[in-house]
Image (cartoon, coloured by chain):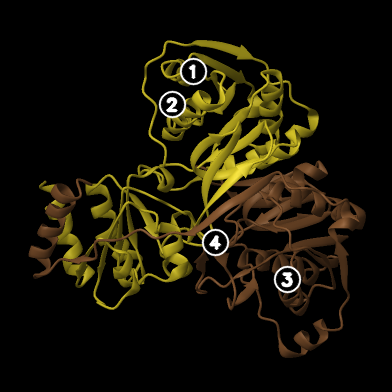
Amino acid sequence: MKIISVIKQVPDAEARIRATPTGIDLDGVTFVIDGMDEYGVEQSLRLREGGLDTELISLALGPKRFEEAIRTSLAMGSDRAIHIETDEALDPITQAKVLASIIQEEGAELVFVGGKEADWDSAALGPAIAEALGWPHSDWTTRLEINDTSLSVTHDSDEGSETLTLPLPAVITTQQGLNEPRYPTLPNIMKAKRKELKKLTLADVGSPSGKTQVLKQEIQTKSRLNKVVQGDAADAAKELARLLHEEAKAI
Amino acid sequence: MILVIAEHSNGSLKKSALELLSAAKSLSEKLGGEVVAALLGQDLSGAASELAKYVNKVIAVEDAALADVRAEPYTTVLTNLAKELEAKAVLVSASKSGLSYSARVAMRLDAPLLEDVTSLDVEGGQVIASRFSYLARVTETVKALALPIVISVKPNIFPVAEASASGTVDKKAADLAASDDRVKVGEKAAAKTGRVALDEADIIVTGGRGVGSAEGFTKLVEPLADALSAGIGATRAVVDAGWRPYSEQVGQTGKTVAPGVYIALGVSGAVQHLSGMNRSKIIVAINKDADAPIFKVADYGIVGDVNEVVPALKEAVSSL
């Protein structure tokens, strides 16, 4: 059985992002594999370690710099990778179509996608891939077991959490709680450099055009009052309650 | 026309449904066409008559297969409705389930998706939206290049609609495919009973590592939250320590919230946490470390021990 993990590379959460008149400037920013995607890679490794006979493939669509994130997934333990290299910022629905076509070509039966991407703040990619493939999916997944031809999962719902069973093939979107991703070891980092990384271009997948266009990006700045209330605990608390009630009219 | 999917729970509408209606109304004024609200589920009569006070046309799709919010049957019903009614836009709440099925609906309609939007406008017949990106540090303006479009609307941003209609309710069959029933729901666990859901809360009280323990939450965070009818949040450190459930986590890997007031107790203010709450209208911080980064984003702060300040604050707000 083939398992595909979709990989993205995103700015480190601590990285400083600057705004320019034409958009945001990511120059000099440290990039990492999206933490949400690591859960998928880790889960696929655990399925194999649990006795499942699988080939683990990392799949990415993005600029050349994504290679580093792809290598990280290979160093964690994926067997090989496919990178559709483009500088074009395609929307999640268009990306999902492209990724689904590769998943179909590979004949994978289980696909992991990060629950929410740390660059687009988007949760659409996984469900959209599932729809493009005509497969079921589980979103916001925190537990996964495989039983022959079906999956038993726990995922977050609007009201709390619920367990689901769904048949394979399926798409799973991951989130914190699913597992604790491993750190690549030095020997595995070295080994990863020799693993296959197949390169494709957008032309190889039909040169799709996007459905949305980003017109403007601005850094969020909201000026804050930064008022520190003085006094002992009781007085400060009383004054804070008064400020929230009378000045901010918030409570 | 503009199709709105109204979320409901236990027979009554969710606040997000009324927010969608006000977003849809202003969009319909710019884009043309009437607003139609759809309800999906089982035993919808209560929610449907409530909804008819806000919008002229309500469509109730009742089917046992829609009793739980599942992406595939929802996608089938919504795409069928959107096609039949020739919707220019389908509006969905950006709840956990809404984010999920809206992506499937967009794919099935081959339509642009504007996700988790905070404002909507129309220019030259094209829909333009604002939304957050890069862990809510960036606001981006995005244009949809075609119609129809699917839009998921961020909760707690748009005003709630006013009850000014006396609409009609039409019932419609779900017309589902066999494949829509592939995902079976088993056991359900409610997040936390009796308290307002994080993404619907006007006030959120969040505890960080500084609260000290799970008991600290019971002793400090819960009483203050209850005095304010607030939702309860937690930082990743707290969730990792097992003091609180994942469902309460605010931040990069948890929920993104933007309440009227966000009260952070013993929260240091790591970037991963700030990204989940930095859009709150008013931020209050109580922390014993005056240099904690949380104070940089706070409107009001007290430098002090949560064990002393929080009970005093609870007394103070109770006597307002």
Disc 4 and disc 1 on one polypeptide chain: yes
Confirm whether residue A58 shows in the render: yes
Is A125 or A215 nearer to us in this picture?
Answer: A215
Q: Residue at x 55, y 53 (%)?
A: A216
Q: How many marks?
A: 4
> Is B170 placed above or below B201 here?
above
In the picture, the disc for residue B48 is 1
> Is B67 placed above or below B183 here?
above
Where is mark 4, residue-wise? B134
- Give the mark toward the camera: 4 or 2: 4
Give the quarter of the image for residue A59. bottom right
Q: Going from the N terminus, do you reach mark 4 or mark 1 first? A: 1
Q: The residue under label 4 is which amino acid type?
A: Tyr
Q: Position of residue B80 (x, y in %)?
A: 71, 24
- Give the mark toward the camera: 2 or 3: 3
> Is A134 placed above or below B168 here?
below
In the picture, the disc for residue A66 is 3
Question: For the residue labelled by badge 4, is the local secondary structure a helix, a strand or a loop?
Answer: loop
